[in-house]
Image (cartoon, helix red, strand yellow):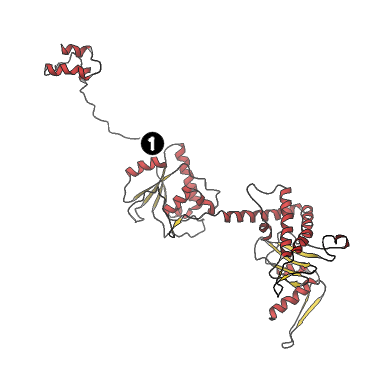
């Protein structure tokens, strides 16, 4: 056995037998190591934690006595010490009848089940769970460091080296003793219980966000440009401009007046999502924001990030909205999006707001002085050139006037 494994094994024996002194003497070098843990699991766990726990350690032990032999054999039970930390690596060690189980097993599953049941019940009792958040056992267990020592009659292990416990009753054994003990502790220390609930809810929200993360839609390994984007022909960032316009109708007008060489048009459908409180991983769930990011060629980022601008496709991104209340609202929503999730575009001077005119100028058409023949006055000095022409004049109107009948005579 390697010396490191032997050292760990002997040290664990001292942990599991509080007050007992365990010594390792190396005859060849004369080195001697000695361990004594008067506090048992608690002292050992405190010495190995990578960060300070957010609440005091939860420790306890329970073994079946003669009155409980109906469910478990007398002497069966467990001793445990659990610490919850907000960061750092977690430390987990478990033993069955003083035998290390580095691969875990059903006794660890029982601890996990007991912790989850107690914490979930406390959160529901005090109505602490936000709407839309669903708790899972891993949300409680992911930040838990522990040392667990179980005593099981006739344990069944997986493999010859006994790295994992497979006894089914061990899960029910440990869970039955851990859950009521933690429930009692949480209800006796409500403020500390709420701190633990905050940590668990935070883990649940992180897990749900990770599961809902939306990536760019890609084809053949590259992002696919939006189908409604009318791109420009030039690839020179110095001159290229992208106009974000309201809807397809405005997009059609902009396409007619644009310079195809340097100006691109991207119509947006309706009002853009207010992205101020939207997580970055959820941005691409909105089609309009996804299309803007793909068209511009820069991924969402934070103020302290260093985004990749090698894919930038336009030197100017121009917000072109109507000169009304809705247009101003859309303008603010787009500016919010860029300020919150594309701040480097603003810092580098790529974002512009186009000012629509509040008036229009038009060239008046020259008014024709000649009126229809049927509306001419009889006092006019220029009679028709021929009688035949005058006779055909009434036929050109639906109802000839008295003046036209006079000319016909």
Residue situated in front as seen by the camera: 150 or 250: 150
- Residue 213 seen by the camera: yes
Instruction: From the top left corner, tell me how far across and down residue 289 is, in percent.
Output: 47, 49
Residue under the image location 70 percent in, 47 percent down: 127
Residue situated in front as seen by the camera: 54 or 260: 260
Residue under the image location 48 percent in, 48 percent down: 287
Quadrant where the C terminus is found in the figure: top left
**Where is residue 16, by image quadrant?**
bottom right
Q: Is residue 279 left or right of residue 160?
A: left
Instruction: From the top left corner, tell me how far across and down residue 58 is, in percent.
Output: 76, 61
Instruction: From the top left corner, tell me how far across and down residue 388 is, in percent.
Output: 12, 17
Q: Residue furthest right?
A: 66
Residue situated in front as seen by the camera: 352 or 392: 392
Tell me if residue 84 comes above or below residue 362 in the rendering: below
Q: Residue furthest bottom?
A: 28
According to the picture, the residue beneath numbered tag 1 turns out to be: 358
- Residue 349 seen by the camera: no
Instruction: From the top left corner, tell me how far across and down residue 304 is, in percent.
Output: 52, 58
Q: Is residue 221 left or right of residue 254?
A: right
SS at badge 1: loop
Sort mark 1 into few (<14), some (14-19) or many (20+) by Cα contacts within 10 Å: few
Q: Is residue 326 left or right of residue 198?
A: left
Residue situated in front as seen by the camera: 58 or 220: 220
Residue under the image location 36 percent in, 43 percent down: 254
Tell me if residue 356 comes above or below residue 220 in the rendering: above
Quadrant where the N terminus is found in the figure: bottom right
């Amino acid at each position: 056995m390697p010396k490191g494994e032997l050292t760990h094994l002997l040290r664990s024996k001292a942990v599991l037998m509080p007050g007992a002194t365990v010594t390792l003497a190396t005859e060849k070098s004369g080195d001697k190591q000695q361990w004594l843990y008067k506090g048992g699991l608690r002292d050992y766990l405190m010495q190995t934690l990578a960060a300070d726990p957010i609440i005091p350690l939860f420790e306890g032990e329970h073994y079946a006595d003669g009155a409980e032999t109906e469910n478990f054999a007398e002497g069966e039970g467990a001793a445990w010490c659990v610490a919850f930390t907000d960061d750092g690596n977690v430390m987990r060690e478990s033993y069955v009848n003083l035998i290390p189980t580095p691969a875990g097993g059903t006794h660890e599953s029982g601890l996990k089940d007991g912790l989850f049941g107690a914490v979930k019940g406390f959160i529901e009792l005090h109505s602490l769970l936000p709407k839309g958040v669903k708790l899972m056992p891993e949300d409680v267990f992911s930040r838990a460091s522990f040392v667990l020592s179980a005593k099981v009659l006739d344990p069944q292990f997986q493999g010859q080296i006994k790295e994992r416990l497979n006894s089914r009753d061990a899960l029910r054994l440990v869970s039955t003793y851990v859950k009521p003990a933690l429930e009692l502790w949480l209800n006796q220390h409500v403020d500390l219980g709420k701190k633990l609930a905050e940590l668990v809810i935070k883990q649940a929200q992180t897990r749900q966000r990770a599961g809902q993360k939306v990536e760019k839609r890609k084809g053949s390994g590259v992002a696919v440009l939006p189908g409604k984007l009318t791109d420009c022909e030039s690839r020179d960032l110095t001159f290229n401009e992208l106009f974000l316009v309201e809807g397809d109708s405005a997009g059609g007008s902009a396409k007619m007046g644009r310079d195809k060489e340097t100006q691109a048009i991207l119509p947006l459908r309706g009002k853009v999502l207010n992205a101020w409180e939207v997580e970055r991983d959820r941005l691409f769930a909105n089609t309009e924001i996804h299309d803007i990011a793909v068209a511009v060629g820069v991924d969402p980022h934070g103020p302290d990030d260093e985004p990749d601008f090698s894919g930038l496709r336009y030197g100017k991104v121009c917000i072109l909205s109507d000169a009304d209340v809705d247009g101003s609202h859309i303008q603010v929503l787009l500016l919010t999006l860029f300020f919150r999730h594309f701040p480097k575009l603003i810092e580098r001077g790529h974002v512009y707001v186009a000012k629509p005119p509040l008036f229009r100028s038009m060239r008046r058409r020259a008014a024709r002085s000649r009126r229809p023949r049927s509306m001419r006055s009889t006092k006019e000095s220029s009679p028709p050139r021929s009688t035949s022409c005058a006779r055909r004049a009434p036929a050109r109107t639906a109802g000839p006037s008295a003046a036209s009948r006079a000319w016909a005579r």
